[in-house]
Amino acid sequence: MIDISEVQQLLRDPNPKNLICKELEFRPQNLALFIAALSNTIDEYGYIVIGASKNADKYSVNGISPDFKIDEPIKRAIGLLSEQPRIDFGCLTIDGKNIYAIKVKKVVSEIYFKPMHSTEPQADLFIRDLYLACIKLQARKLYANATEDERNDFIADLLETSGYRIKDQSRRGSSATGKSSGEVDIFVEKNSMPFTIIEALNLESLNTSYIDAHLDKIYSYDTAGNPFNVCLSYVKVKDFGSFWDKYCDHVRKHTYPVMLISSNVNADNDYSYSDIRFMTTTHNRSGKITCLYHICVKIHEL
C-alpha cells in the first residue's frame, strides 16, 4: 500500500537513499533499472516518484495527467528483470497535482536488469587476461614488497603482450580535489577508443576511506562512460578470506557517483583459485548498464 505521508516525508528529506524522483519517466528500460536498484537496497523498501523533481530538502510537483496509465510500462519493465519484484503503485495527489508512486520492496535474492546488448564477451576476455597477469604477479617474489606503481607496470606490460594498448598514468578526468586532471593508473584502449580503466591500490587492511576514494576516482577519470572498469587491489593481510568477505560487504553498501543496481559476489565462480577473488557491481550510468569489477589479489609474504 502506498502511504502518501511517507512519500511526502521522503520528498522533504535532504538525502533519502531509498527514493528515486523523476519529473517524467515511463520508459520500461529505465523503470526496470530503478526497480532493480531499489529492490537491492539495504532499506526494507523504497519509492520511485514520477511527476516531481527534488533538490536537497526542496521539491516541486510538476504533475502528470491522471489519464495516463502506468500499468503497461511497469509490466514491460518487470519483463526486463531477472526475477519478479514485489511492488505496489498508484496515483497520488500532492500539492493539488497528480504523481505516480511505485513502492519497491527489498528482496532476498538480488534482482538485476537483463541488458539487450551484452558487453560480457569482451569484458570476460579482458578479465581473463588480467586474472592471468595477477597470477604471474603473485608468483614473482620481487613484487612482494613492491610499490603500487611497480606492480601496475608489471600488470600493464603483461596486458600489452596480450594485445591491449596501454596508457599508464594518463592525465585524464579530474582529481579528487577537482582542481586538476588526475592520473589514471592503467588506461586501456582498443581500436584507438577508450576500453577500460584500472584503478589500483595497495591494501594492508580494510581501509574503507582509502577504498572509497579510489572507487570514486574511477568515475571522475572515466569521462566517456566505459561499459566496464576495474578496481584492482593488491592485498597483504594474514586472513585473506575474512578480508574478502568484509570487502564485498563494504563495496555493496558504498554510495557510488552513479546509481548502484546490483552486485554479484559469485562473479568468479569459473575461477577456482582462493587467493585471487573478484566480484562485480552493476550500475546505471545515464540510462545504460555499466559494470565495475572488484579484483583483490593476495600478496604473499617473503
Image (tube, helix red, strand yellow):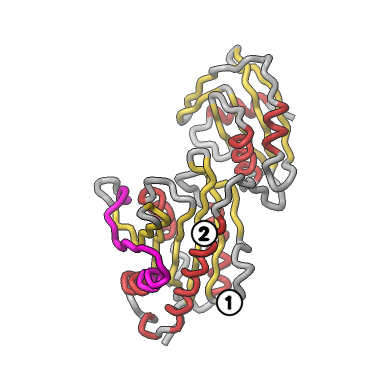
Q: Counting residues from the N terminus, which is met first, the one under dot 1 or under dot 2?
A: 2
What is the CA distance from the residue labelled 1 to the residue labelled 2?
20 Å
Q: Secondary structure at mark 2?
A: helix
Q: Which residue is drawn at the image coordinates 37% and 46% (left, top)?
A: 223
Q: Which residue is drawn at the image coordinates 59% and 26% (left, top)?
A: 50
**Span shown in magenta:** 155-176
Total numbered labels placed on residues in the image: 2
Report the mark closest to the observer, 1 or 2.
Answer: 2
Q: Quadrant of the C terminus?
A: bottom left
Question: Which of 193 and 265 lies nearest the eye of the viewer?
Answer: 193
**Percent from the top left, x then y, of residue 10?**
58, 31
Q: Which residue is mark 2?
A: 123
Question: Which of 191 and 120 lies nearest the eye of the viewer?
Answer: 191
Q: Is residue 289 left or right of residue 151?
A: right
Q: Which residue is drawn at the image coordinates 63% and 69% (left, top)?
A: 270
Q: Which residue is mark 1?
A: 273
Question: Which of 63 and 59 lies nearest the eye of the viewer?
Answer: 63
Q: Amino acid under label 1?
A: Tyr
